[in-house]
Structure formats: C-alpha cells, structure tokens
Image (spheres, rainbow, N blue to C red):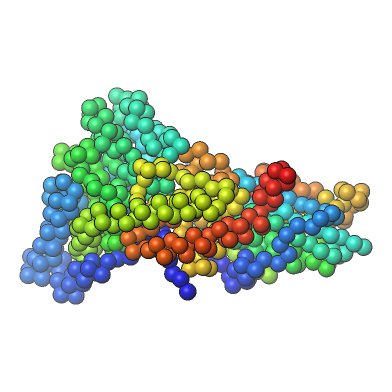
C-alpha cells in the first residue's frame, strides 16, 4: 500500500536531526531558563544560542527575535500588539483578502474593537498590487500586513516593494511568512519588513513553536501577560526543546534550500504538466511561475473536493482541498473566491504540496490514479451530466 | 470522521446512474453550496421498481444519496413519502454534525422526485409537500446547525 504525503503546507514531519537536538532538553537539561543553577544555565544557554542562530539566518539581531507558540500566536501578537501600541497615531490597518485566518480573523476582531481594516483585492493569480497598497494608505494607517506566500495557492507576494512603500510612508509592515521561511531566502532587512511571523512545523521543525521578528524600535504591547520572559514582552516558561528544534530545523532548511528547491521545482512542474495533460476541464490556481516550489493547486470542474480527497486517501495519497466540506464552514476557500473562482469551482479544488522527500515515482503513481478518480466522480456528477447534454 | 457504513456507501455507491424515461426526477441542492442531488424514479403500480441517483458533493452527500435510494427501492409510494433524514442517518450509523444537512438533502431529493411523478401524472400523493426553493432552503439548513 502506498503512503504518499502530499500535504506539506499543512505540516511536515520533524527531521531526525531536529529531534536529536531537542532530546537532551527534555531529560537532562530540563531546567527553567529563568533559574540560576547549573541545569537551568544550560537551558538558558540553549535558548540564547537558538535565538542568535535564527537571528543570523534571517539577517536580524539577537534582540529582535521573540519565541511564540507558532504562526497563529505570532500573527495575533504582531497585529494586536502593534494596533494597541499605535492607537494614538491611528486606527487603520491594511491587509489582503487572501491572508491566513490567523491574520484575517485577528483583523476582524480588531474591527469589532473600533479599528478600520482595508482588505485589498488580489489579481487572478493571487497577487497584491503594490499600487493598491500605496492608494490605501491614509493618515490614520498604522499597520500593513501582507503574507509572504500564500498557503493555498503558493503565490509569492512582492514583499520588498510593499515594504519600500510602507517605509516611505512611515507605516509599519508585518508579513506572515509561515509558508515562506525555510522555503525561500529571506532577509528581513532586504525585505523591508518590521515584523515577520514564522512557524517551526512548516519546515520540518516541531509543532507548537514559532517566532516573531520585531525590528528594533517598533513598539509592541504584550498579549500574553506573565513573567519577564522574552524581554518582558511574552510571559511563559520558554519551550526550550521546541526553541532548540526550531533553530536546528531552520538552519537545516536554509542549508538544504537550494538543492531541495531545485528538486521540488522539477517535481512540481512535472505534476502540473501531468495533470494538465491527463485531465480535461482543469485549471491551475495561483501564479504560474511566481509560486512556492512545493505548491500545486488545481480546480477540477464538475466535482467536489472532499470526495476527491477521500478517493485519493483510499489509494494512499494525502492531499487537501479548498472545498467547504473540508473547511468545516458553508463557504469554500476565501482564497479561491478572491482570485475569482465561482463557488462551484472553488468547491472542486485540490491542493498538493510536495516536500523534499517526495519522488518522481510517487508523482507517477499519483498521475496514474488521479485521472480515473476524477472520471469516476464526474460520472457520478449531475453537473457533468448537464454539461455533456448541453454539448451534444 | 465517517462511519464504516458511510465509507462503504461512498466507496461503493448503490444505484448510481441515470434512468431513461424515468417516471419522476428530483434535483435538490445547488452548486454554490457544494452539493447537488438528482434522483430518478421508475414507478409502476405505485411501487418504486427502480431508482438511480447522481450527486455532486462530499462523501456524506454521496453516501446519503446511495442510502436513500436503497431505503425506497421496491417500496410503495406511500412508504417512500415517509422517508425521513433520520432514517437515512440511522441506517448510516450517523454523520458528523456539519454533514447532517446531507441527509436532509437526500430526503428532499426523494420527495422532489415523487412530486415530479405526481405532477406528471396529475395525481396527489398524500402527505407529500411541494419542493421548496433549493437555494433558500439549503441555506436555512446550514443556519440551523450553527
């Protein structure tokens, strides 16, 4: 039985080297970094070294990296923390319509608290137009939050350019880089960002650990009140094994990035080409070239995504979809709707996100089983029946 | 997430297909919400001799369509009118809460096909209500869940 994991944008396995690096901090060096005795000093040192390592890898300073529980907390903190700190300056936030819910729902919450939010549209490929950002800035704008790369369709945003605009206008710029860190080269200075969210488990690190880069000089109120950890800005005993795992995973991801991306790009384009050739009435979602090396997202006309996932699962292939039935809500993916897909097409989407461990043999098996599965669902679909009758 | 019975009916749907010259055809749901069910009935002497379905939708939508056709096949019109979403649910050993609306849709699809049969033949079937507007009704069901 095949077991092909094609859902790397959801999460990744933790690398063995990462687990090995974490293990000592569970049993031997388990001390609380805030304590002063020896076992605690070793865990404090591990936290410091990890912070320095991550700072170096992102072009940041030691004091600009804050550890969090993951991408969701980083996004919440960046947006709420800045909004509160700068509320005397203004109450306007600019974001895009295709952000992750960690950003969108945080912005919606702030709207309920009296803030004003502009949700910028995207083009058919899912790209934000920097000109739109420029036009949306007002005297009251305090923050722009645009994701680095989209989790569903893989489209990479013009972050440097948006950052330049934000800088010129004196507005802070946050980017949710959860899908991008460890996958594309990122230097926070070059990218012109003031705040950046990242999450460990998206690049073979552990779950439950992430970080927020906060440029020196940016004011940010705490959202987790407690002890004096993280320079008084984020209370809570440090997740020492997680922090060590995060730094190790990022170091390895960046070391292997070129090689892995080259391999994944080839495989990605092989799968995109294969689906386009073997299945009729399909459309690639997202930017054709300016997209993450791991992302493949297709719409299959006349069928629904969850059914497709279940049948692929029965063949040992694990993917995801933007259909309503898999999102647990009435509406299909807000990202697919934002790039202009009608509801019925958004329901029929399939996201395949590959990883460096996937092989051409796996891609071939997938491309062999996919067409009959799509046909089987189309033969069952009244939409396809109507389409054929209209055609005849 | 799904019971074994749901998975069985999804993987091996019963009575999937079309019926030419069907006595009654019912379509419910809409593509916008992500599920459409179409039921074909072949009725002779008040008995449902054959039934087929076609469904665009999730695993639960396919499984409830399949189960609903099984529950009415060979039954009298009067028995089919009494089909409820609860019966479909129970026969499938239940569904996750967000998928219960699929069983309602399956019940409505059978009733819509019976209504079509009654209209075509100028008869009245006791206890059968006319199908409601698909769009509105479907949204109501979703709203009920929340």
Q: Position of residue A147 (x, y in %)?
A: 33, 43
Does residue A245 lie above or below B122 as drawn?
below
In the rendered structure, the answer to whether residue A339 lies left or right of residue A263 reads right
Numbered marks: total: 0
Q: Residue furthest front?
A: A277
Q: In which quadrant will I find the C terminus of chain A?
A: top right
Residue A123: % across, % down = 43, 35
Q: Does residue A321 appear in this view?
A: yes
Q: Is residue A368 above or below residue B56?
A: below
> Horizontal and vertical percent for residue B8?
62, 70
* In the rendered image, the vertical position of residue B74 relative to residue A351, given as above or below: below
> Which picture quadrant has residue A174?
top left
Residue at (69% x, 47% y) in the render: A388
Indicate whether B134 appears above or below A364. above
A389 vs A310, left or right, is: right
The percent coordinates of residue A33 (x first, y second) are 14, 63
Q: Quadrant of residue B105?
A: bottom right
A92 horizontally vs A123: left or right? left
Please say whether residue B128 is visible from this viewpoint: no
| Residue in the image at 28% along x and 57% along y | A260
Task: Judge by depth and name the residue closer to the eye, A4 or A228.
Answer: A4
In-front residue for pair A46/A360: A360
B57 vs A95, left or right, is: right
- The residue at the point 40 percent across, 51 percent down is A269
Q: Residue at x 32, y 60 (%)?
A: A356
């Amino acid at each position: 039985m095949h077991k092909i994991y094609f859902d790397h944008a959801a999460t990744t396995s933790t690398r063995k080297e990462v687990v090995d690096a974490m293990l000592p901090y569970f049993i031997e060096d388990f001390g609380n970094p805030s304590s002063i005795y020896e076992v605690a000093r070793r865990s404090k040192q591990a936290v410091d070294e990890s912070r320095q390592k991550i700072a170096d890898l992102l072009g940041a300073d030691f004091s600009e990296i804050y550890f969090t529980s993951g991408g969701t907390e980083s996004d919440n903190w960046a947006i709420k923390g800045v909004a509160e700190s700068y509320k005397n300056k203004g109450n306007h936030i600019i974001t895009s319509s295709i952000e992750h819910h960690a950003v969108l729902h945080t912005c919606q919450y702030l709207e309920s608290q009296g803030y004003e939010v502009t949700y910028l549209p995207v083009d058919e490929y899912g790209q934000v137009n920097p000109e739109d950002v420029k036009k949306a800035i007002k005297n009251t704008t305090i923050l722009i939050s645009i994701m680095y790369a989209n989790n569903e369709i893989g489209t990479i945003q013009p972050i440097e350019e948006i950052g330049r605009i934000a800088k010129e206008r004196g507005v802070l710029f946050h980017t949710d880089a959860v899908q991008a860190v460890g996958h594309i080269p990122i230097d926070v200075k070059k990218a012109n960002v003031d705040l950046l969210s990242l999450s460990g488990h998206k690049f073979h690190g552990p779950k439950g650990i992430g970080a927020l880069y906060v440029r020196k000089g940016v004011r940010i109120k705490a959202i987790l009140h407690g002890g004096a950890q993280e320079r008084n800005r984020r209370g809570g005993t440090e997740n020492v094994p997680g922090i060590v795992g995060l730094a190790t995973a990022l170091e390895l991801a960046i070391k292997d990035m070129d090689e892995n991306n080259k391999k994944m790009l080839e495989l990605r384009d092989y799968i995109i080409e294969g689906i386009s050739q073997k299945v009729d009435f399909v459309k690639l979602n997202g930017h054709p070239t300016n997209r993450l090396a791991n992302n493949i997202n297709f719409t299959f006309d006349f069928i629904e995504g969850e059914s497709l996932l279940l049948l692929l699962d029965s063949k040992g292939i694990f993917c995801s979809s933007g259909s309503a039935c898999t999102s647990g809500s009435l509406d299909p993916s807000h990202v697919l709707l934002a790039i202009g897909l009608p509801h019925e097409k958004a329901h029929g989407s399939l996201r395949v996100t590959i990883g460096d461990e996937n092989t051409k043999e796996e891609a071939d098996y997938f491309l062999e089983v996919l067409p009959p599965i799509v046909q089987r669902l189309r033969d069952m679909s009244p939409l396809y029946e109507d389409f054929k009758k209209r055609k005849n | 997430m799904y019971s074994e019975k749901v998975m069985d009916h999804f993987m091996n749907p019963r009575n999937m297909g079309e019926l030419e010259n069907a006595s009654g055809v019912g379509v419910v749901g809409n593509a916008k919400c992500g599920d459409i069910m179409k039921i074909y009935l072949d009725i002779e002497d008040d008995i449902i001799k054959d039934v087929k379905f076609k469904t665009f939708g999730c695993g639960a939508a396919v499984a409830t369509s399949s189960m609903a056709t099984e529950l009415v096949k060979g039954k009298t019109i009067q028995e089919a009118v009494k089909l409820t979403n609860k019966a479909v649910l129970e026969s499938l050993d239940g569904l996750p809460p967000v998928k219960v609306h699929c069983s309602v849709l399956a019940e409505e699809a059978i009733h819509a096909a019976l209504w079509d049969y009654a209209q075509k033949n100028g008869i009245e079937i006791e206890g059968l209500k006319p199908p409601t507007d698909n769009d509105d009704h479907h949204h109501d069901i979703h709203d009920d869940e929340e």
